[in-house]
Amino acid sequence: MEQTLRLIFRNAEGRTVTMSVSNPKDPLESTDVDNAMDLIISTDIFQTSGGSITEKVKAEVVSRQVNTILEF
């Protein structure tokens, strides 16, 4: 099963910004994710069309499973 970690922030204009990380380590600790999100904000290394990333909204893991039913 494929997993993607989605880090969701708000930028200076109040718009939502999402960063995706494919195949994050397992197990994923919430404190590690929280610290990484704080680091992204504090270092201000990512600029969006709406300005700097200013706050955390949420982090989520999306799991996707593909079952092939027919292949040629």
Image: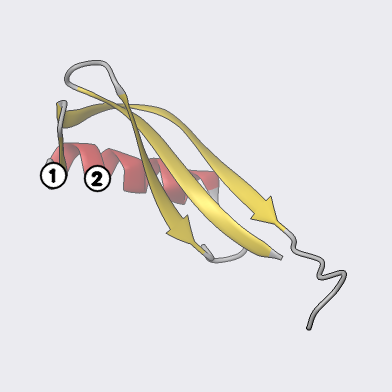
Q: Which residue is rendered at x = 69% and y = 56% of the image?
A: 64
Q: Which residue is mark 1?
A: 43
Q: Which residue type does callout 1 highlight?
A: Thr
* Residue in the foreground of this view, choosing between 57 and 30: 57
Q: Residue furthest front?
A: 72
Q: Are marks 2 and 1 in contact (CB under 8 Å)?
A: yes
Per the image, the residue denoted by label 2 is 39
Disc 2 on helix, strand or loop? helix
User: In which quadrant is the C terminus drawn?
Assistant: bottom right
Q: Position of residue 65 (x, y in %)?
A: 74, 60
Three-letter amino acid code of the residue under disc 2? Leu
Say what secondary structure mark 1 lies in: helix
Q: CA distance from mark 2 to mark 1?
A: 6 Å
Report whether 37 appears left or right of 49: right
Of the 4 image quadrants, the one containing the N terminus is bottom right
User: Could you say where residue 30 lies in the image, as x and y percent from the top left?
Assistant: 53, 44
